[in-house]
Image (cartoon, rainbow, N blue to C red):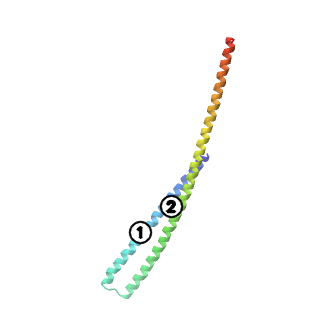
Amino acid sequence: MVKKVVDDFERRKAEALAACERRVTESEKKLAELEEYRAGYVRDFSVRAKSGINGAAARDFQAFLARLDEALHQQNQAVTSTRAQRDAERQNWQDAAQRAEAIGTTVKRWQGEERYALERREQHESDERSQRIWAQGRLISGA
């Protein structure tokens, strides 16, 4: 029963780790998309700027670029946060796995000790039966 509880706990920790891994992957993907969008926006603006733009367009570009940079900063923080959560979940899972392994080893040892005790008891009973049969045979034969 204890082994089952510990194994279930470890399984739940592994599932939590897998969920964190997915969140890390998703946040890293969003960051990469934002970086790619920013780079494309800067490239497009550079092409347009070569043909000449007015001051309002330049200010709009700078303002939008500032918003993109803020979004990148926030997404970088999200990536850092999800990685930290993943690392904590990995440690939790490793701890649970070690406990499950220790409990499993203990259960196996107890089962081995029980099996050994049962075998000794059966051997003792067999020896007693053999001695009774031998003693009865001697009584019957009069020896």
Q: Residue furthest top?
A: 142
Mark 2 crowd level (few <14, some 14–19, many ≥20, 10 Å Cα) = many
Mark 1 crowd level (few <14, some 14–19, many ≥20, 10 Å Cα) = some
Residue 135 in picture, x, y percent from top left? 68, 18
CA distance separating discs 1 and 2:
18 Å
Q: Residue furthest bottom?
A: 55
The residue indicated by pointer 1 is 32
Quadrant of image for the N terminus: top right
- The correct choice, above or below, for 20 with respect to 136 in the image is below
Q: Which mark is residue 20?
A: 2
- The correct choice, above or below, for 27 with respect to 16 in the image is below
Residue sitting at x 62%, y 38%: 113
Residue 15 in picture, x, y percent from top left? 52, 56
Q: Secondary structure at mark 1?
A: helix
Closer to the camera in the image, 134 or 11: 134
The part of the image, by quadrant, that contains residue 38 is bottom left
Residue 42 in picture, x, y percent from top left? 37, 78
Q: Which mark is residue 2?
A: none
Amino acid tagged 2: Cys
Q: Is residue 29 left or right of residue 127?
A: left
Closer to the camera in the image, 120 or 33: 120
